[in-house]
Image (cartoon, helix red, strand yellow):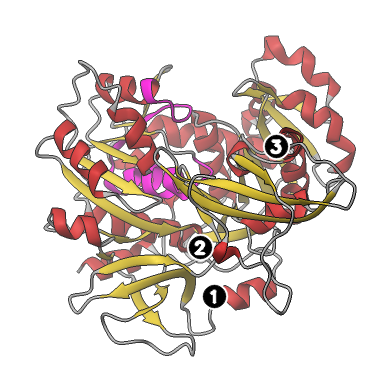
Amino acid sequence: MADEQVLAAAESGVAEVVARWARDAPDRAFLLTDAGVLGYRAVDEGAREVAEALLAVGIDEGDRVAVAAPNCTEWILLWLATAKIGAVLVTLNVVYREQEFEYMLGQSVARLLVCAAEARGYDFVAMLAAMRDRIPGVEGIVFLADGDGAGDLAAVSGALSWPEFVAGGRGGRAGAPPASAVGAAPAVILYTSGTTGAPKGAVLTQGGILASAAGEAERFDLIGTDVILGHMPLNHVGGLTCTIAAAAVAGAAVALVPGFHPEQSLDAAASRRVTVLVGVPTMYTLMLGGIGDRDLSAVRLCVVGGANLEPALAQRMRQAFPGVRIANLYGASEASGACIVSAADDGPELIATSIGTPLAGVRVRVVGPDGAPVPPGADGELQVRGPSVAAGYWGMPEATAAAFGADGWLATGDVAVLSEDGHVALRGRLKEMYVRGGYNVYPAEVENFVGGLAGVAMVAVIGVPNAVYGETGRAFVVPARGAEIEPDVIREACRAAFAAYKVPDEVLVVDALPLTPAGKIRKAVLPTGEV
């Protein structure tokens, strides 16, 4: 029955589900924010207003609309609005900077950008004013700023404030939006860095997102009285699918916060009587030290994703949340979110050694170098299949063919072992990617940039163990003949080019790097301990 429900979800979409709750339980709380509580009907009506505004500025079915903002109501309304008219949302992180914006907006051929005027102390108005001529395909920019503060927006050609944008669609001038896109229709382009250094845009479908969310909701027994803490970034499947979409499937609520900050997250969890926490190990590590006298007795479930849950952290969580269920969650952008999750009856030993079993509708296998399945207990590459698997990478047929097999199997690049009873245990990664605080970092992207800096002859970036972030970046840089390199200069250049989590935490200047006979860097022998 669970498989049938997930397959049915794959024929639908999140906007359609929200509209259904708006009809059947209009006043049920959906979004809990500092500004107040929005029920399902209010959210659906708000999304319809934004859909009309999109139509009014010429956005049509299949067009790409990019968004870069902290977690907020407007972000969710825009997502639902694009689904209502069949447009595709391109999700950007507010930690991205000029180089990332230019590439992703251009590669996705986004026609409209909705962006925070300021986030985390960074002035996006100034940034976009400086780079406006480098994103000619973006016909309009909407800033999340009120009308009173819109004077600064004049520096950006074609810019509107959010109130101006929404007002432009009122009065029915654009006509009623068509029926919401569902099923295999593209919903979201979510960028994940690639091993070649070029970020790849995974194309998530309307039904794929909902299928993953439905499987998660079923595994976690989500119901209408649940409140999920919404501090995972919405541009990430942890926020998009595992939080918002999963809540919508169950008719549950989300306590939305702009982003993760231990104190802010804990305050929201206590004041909103949150029942479900979702986060990566780093987030739990930082929150556990600051609970204090906050009342978190409503919490019934702690979901841990993004990296392996270490036994020591699991023990601390059990002490902080006695009697609460703790579950591992394994997912991927290319799988629209969760695909392998701890079962309800998995005890502490299984939680420590396994990421769980496949969700309803998901099939897994472990294959050897020849692509053939290996027997239970043998190492190999983990592959997944099911309705939640993405349609491919936007505009990258070769990368799509490499990751998404013609037979429907997604190659995750992770090394795993499958047990006789269907539990999956991770062993490592085939790829060089490392995970810093829940964010995937692909060294090739950073290496390509640092290798182009003046005075750099060779560079290698690896992930090294870290007690707080799980892993951090360490760059080994070989100077060109006669050149002198200052580590801080390298890091400052990276800060200007990349999101903060991609910047190497350490830059070590070395005379040479170990090479194979073929001239490739032997990263496996680079030191990962203290140096």
Q: Dividing the image into 4 quarters, which one contains the N terminus?
A: bottom left
- Residue 404: mark in rendering: 1
x, y (%) of residue 2?
22, 66
The three-letter code of the residue at mark 2 reads Glu
The numbered mark, 3 or 2, whose residue comes first in the sequence reads 2
**Element at badge 3?**
helix
Q: Which residue is mark 2?
A: 334
338 over 468 or under it: above or below:
below
Mark 2: secondary structure: helix
Residue at x 35%, y 65% (from the top left corner): 426
Q: Identity of the amino acid at label 3?
A: Arg
Of the numbered discs 1 and 3, the one sitting upstream in the chain is 1
* Residue drawn where x is 76% and y is 38% of the image: 98
Whether residue 253 is in magenta: the answer is yes
- Kindly identify which residue carries mark 3: 491
The relative height of residue 182 versus residue 488 in the rendered view (above or below) is below
Q: Which residues are magenta?
A: 234-263
